[in-house]
Image (cartoon, rainbow, N blue to C red):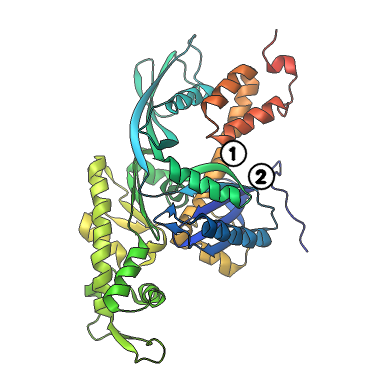
Amino acid sequence: MKPRLAENEKENPIIVGLDIGTTKICVTVGRRSGTNKIELLGVGKAESSGVNRGVVANIQKTVSSIREAVTIAESQSNVDIKVVNVGIAGQHIKSIQHRGILTKRDYDEVGRLDVEQLISDMYKLVLPPGEEIIHVLPQEFTIDNEPGIKEPIGMAGRRVEANFHIISGRVTDIRNIKRCVDNADLEVSSLVLEPLASSEAVLDEEEKTAGVVLVDIGGGTTDVAIFHEGIIRHTAVIPLGGNIVTEDIKQGCSVLRNQAEQLKVRYGSALADENKDNEVICVPGIRGRESKEISVKNLAYIIQARMEEIIEHVYYEIKSSGYEDKLIAGIVITGGGAQLKHLVQLVEYITGIGCRIGYPNEYLAKTEMLNKQALEELKSPMYATSIGLLIKGVQTMEEDEATQQEMVTKKVTKEKVTEIAEEKRKKESWFTKILSDFIKDDAGIDDDTFIGKK
């Protein structure tokens, strides 16, 4: 029997991603390996029956599926899973733009703590009742009236301004996700918007700089994220996905739902004209009834009609963002729906923008923990969010280390750290963790130095 790995390994901590999707719940376990690489240690997948269009509809069923996926992932990776990075989506997701200002006492260099202070101030924004901030994403900074600064850390200045892309969600839906995780005896490390996670898995910095649209077609929702000059510019969640295509086939062809899903996966096409007129599929009848013949071309017409609607919604979001003419890298489609044949051609035909399929294999390192078949399966677009959650977890961990180091260097007071941590309102749990680690002298400095005594 293999020895179990400790989740709090000092050198390479274990990161766990939990993707609570409409069709599947997936748990991925991994750790940092080399430069920008993720070593996968284990994967657990379970059917999702308690989630509808990205929103938890049945807590008990969702908890049961989470536990099943966690058990499989623990068995495969030999890791005791306690803390997870959770993905969130749904029609309730909204985004706004806002600007923040920080005036410093001296003209010293801008540090990570200054940026954190600006972000913390954004969490004080008053939102409509029932809404809560999920992410505060810095876009561009202005230092002493010098605009267009993307990386302010290290620059000298007194007045720091920043534009922020703020993503919010419905409190009820956020609480339901956290309740499901809590009931599964797990702890939420961070809540990550799913298109942001997917973008980390399938896009590179060159594409984000050139201008690109990520379209993640899941079972219940289609997530959109637009990047330009390396900055997130627009996000949206469309409440249509692969499940509604399956329902259309079920109604249009008068078959069972599981048969409709198989027809979509095996013979589905997003362009009817690409199929021959005389191709026919034979579907078994129910309980001894006669089998049914379905034209492949008619099946494609049903699928094409719904996919055109979804792509039109995506195209509307692209035009609304104002970046339609700045997308040099075009559109990248990922998610389970991206596996539909001829989808790239349909997207290019409707939008007039170049398109490709995004596979989450670029950032995966070779691993001996998973067999070759399992590793190949994980390279499918349907696992983009799951892999992306691991990458986001690693990025957060690296930011933690850099922030903690700055605290040591600048001899930040306990009171200052506590103030910023409280302003996070316990939402950004990583900052609270830094605080507790820091106070416990993990940084290796004495109390007098720590609290800034002279």
Indicate left or right for 47 with 347 as reference.
Answer: right
- Measuring from the top left, give residue 260's x and y in whole percent: 36, 75
Q: CA distance from mark 1 to mark 2?
A: 9 Å
- Measuring from the top left, give residue 189's x and y in whole percent: 58, 42
Q: Is residue 141 above or below residue 343?
A: above
Q: Residue at x 47, y 53 (%)?
A: 385
- Viewer-proximal residue, 11 or 185? 185
Residue 150 figure quarter: top left
Residue on which the image places disc 1: 397
Taking the image as drawn, is residue 152 in sight?
A: no
Residue 266 figure quarter: bottom left
Q: Amino acid at mark 1?
A: Met
- Measuring from the top left, give residue 319's x and y in whole percent: 22, 45
Q: Are marks 1 and 2 in contact (CB under 8 Å)?
A: yes
- Measuring from the top left, give residue 74's x and y in whole percent: 66, 58
Residue on which the image places disc 2: 13
